[in-house]
Amino acid sequence: MIEIRDLTKRFDKTLALQGLDLHVPRGSVYGLVGPNGAGKSTLLRCLAGVYRPDGGEVLIDEQPVWENPAVKRRIAYIPDDFYYFVSANLRDLKNFYQGFYPTFDPHLFDKLAAAFPIDPRQPIRHLSKGMQKQAFFWLALSLRPEILLLDEPVDGLDPVMRRQLWSLVMSDVEKSGLTVVVFSHNLRELEDVCDHVGVIEHGRMLLERTLSQLQDNFVKLQVVFRSEAASLPADLPILHHSVTGKVNTYILRTGAGRVSQVVREMDPIFYDILPLTLEEIFIYELGGADYAVKDIIL
């Protein structure tokens, strides 16, 4: 449904996106993962048609997004920082949105009032940032969009409201086939909701996988060898190795079956193979000197 080909975006001399490709299937929840400054928010703005690409293509069902009102009407975008008219309240924004989005559902807007503890007559500027975020979720879901773009969607919200918002979004995914592209630093939360993941670094897409494919390709091995001199064969793709007492912990980029076969042949005292969380995969996939935790004494 969403396809980005060789996307490039510059800001003066800064190359924010360079030759980036992205593929989002219809009805999926696609999580964007990457370090600060990787280009994730820029990518979302290109997808929303806010930024004009300097090179490449941003397509939805093979139609370009830039300066294409028919495509943009299918998209709802909730950025990390909001724009609204200074004196506007939710009722004003509801009327404003209805003028641009033929799919806006006023009955759904009224129904969603039960999910959000916000007075629609109160000026948006008087709300906290968390309440403003809820207000824009309320509006975005009322659009009945085909595509929902989210930049740090639940940052700063309390646990109950986070669960409420994700419940509403996932219900829309299930019932209407909503396609969601979401960037969040809360990788534990992304792991709960995403079925596809893209890892971005320095404006490029490092990899795209389904979440299950990604998790199947990384394992954590804890093993106690019979000899302290023993170690795993050098041909195994080891990303990290640490030792605590007699327990060796390895992070490997390979499947559990291959690791289990190799370790069994070594006849250790004990071993266990564990799946990695999305946060652990992110750390070790982007690991190395440029992304290591520095040991600095203050």
Image: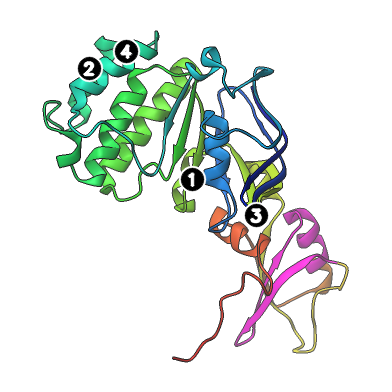
Label 2: which residue?
Answer: 111
- Where 170 falls versus 208 (above or below)? above
Q: Are marks 1 and 4 in contact (CB under 8 Å)?
A: no
Q: Are marks 2 and 4 in contact (CB under 8 Å)?
A: no
Residue 170, how many percent across, how many down? 42, 29
Magenta segment boundaries in residue numbering = 236-263
Q: Nearer the viewer, mark 2 or mark 4?
A: 4
- Of labels 3 and 2, earlier in sequence is 3
- Where 240 falls versus 7 (above or below)? below
Q: Nearer the viewer, mark 3 or mark 4?
A: 3
Q: Residue at x 40, y 29 (%)?
A: 169
Under mark 2, the amino acid is: Lys
- Where 214 falls versus 112 (above or below)? below
Compared across the picture, whether 208 is left or right of 190 comes to right
Under mark 4, the amino acid is: Gln
- Image quadrant containing the N terminus: top right
Q: Residue at x 31, y 24 (%)?
A: 139
Label 1: which residue?
Answer: 190
